[in-house]
Image (cartoon, rainbow, N blue to C red):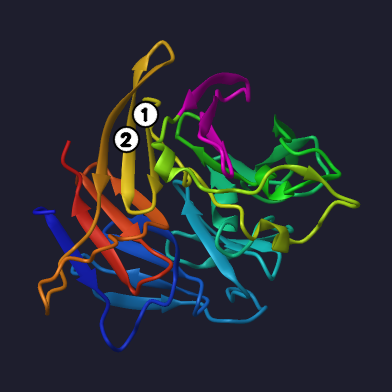
Amino acid sequence: MADSSVESLSSSARLGQARGLIKVDDSLYVADGQQNCIWAIDRQGKISRRIGRSGRGPGEFGDISGIMKNSDHIFTVDISNARIQMFDLNFNLQTIFNHVISGNPFTSGKMMSVTDSLLFLSEGINDFDQLITVYQAAPPFDSLTSFHPRLIPPGMQPAAYNYVSIETNSRGDIAVTYTGLPYIFLYDNDYELQHVVYVGLPKEDLPDNPPIKPVDKPARTVAEAIGVTHLIGKPLLKDDGSLYFSKGSKLYFIRHQGNNKYQAEWIKYYTYANPETHKEKSSGIMISNFIIDEKENTVYLGSFFEENIYRFGLSK
């Protein structure tokens, strides 16, 4: 794309595996699941700071698999240490919320979202009728309510279809997707289902996921997720109700037109030319994480499979 700017990390500090992105002021923060740390990247695309290391102590990570923020705090998801750590915006540790994180290292960061007052967590494959629990976003992290129905009942497989991705906007509206299904479920801030958006993807883009079948006993490990492919990546829900989501190397935008009407606006395919060979990457950038800075009209892309973070102009 002509308006792209590719930001490569310096040789002295390399990103291992991007499992989450946030932007605070002029800095981009990347959760690195391979090296169990967070990298701070400045506007020039250079690493300015490393935060955290492997371990079980305060401020350390056993398996960091997600990062998100609200107006005052930054939250990290640590699946193997079974906890969420809360930092201020300068990454001073404030408190720890011990909680079993559902999912695997590649998906659990999508199973959490946060507003200024509320924390939304997926209950994953546990035997709960409702898949999402709402907590206060500050100590003592009281449980408030649960919503969004279980899809696969106990005794049926693959229960990994019960994994969901959660996104909220500043108004408290919520978007939820099930693993492997082409639907986006939209709730208001009272947790009442308002609308379901069906995403009509081409047949060739649909994953060959396993069928639902009975089993002798419910599985309780993330190993059952093997072979179940996410169809829609974690959605990004704008305050006006419009939606972004990624699949493969493509970013999709669905505009909310009011009165529960939605219009597919555009699809963008992201790739780049190698600065040394000038050859275009044939498979495109496999998008694992993305964030959008609407003030700068910019999208930042991260991938599990590359040591680069990419910045593109988001022309409309």
Mark 2 or mark 1: which comes first in sequence?
Answer: 1
On the image, the x and y values in percent for residue 90 come to 42, 65
- What's the magenta bit mostly, secondary-structure-wise? strand
In the rendered view, does 163 fall on the left or right side of 167? right
Residue 45 visible within the image: no
Residue 100 visible within the image: yes
Instruction: State the residue lying farthest toward the bottom.
Output: 12
Q: Which residues are magenta?
A: 173-198
| Residue for point 70% across, 40% down | 133
The residue at which mark 2 appears reads as: 253
Instruction: Give the secondary structure at mark 2.
Output: strand
Disc 2 residue type?
Phe
Quarter that holds the C terminus: top left
Disc 1 residue type?
Ser
| Residue for point 47% across, 47% down | 233
- Estimate the spatial distance between the alpha carbons at disc 2 and disc 1, rounded to whole Å: 8 Å
- The quarter of the displayed image where residue 95 is located: bottom right
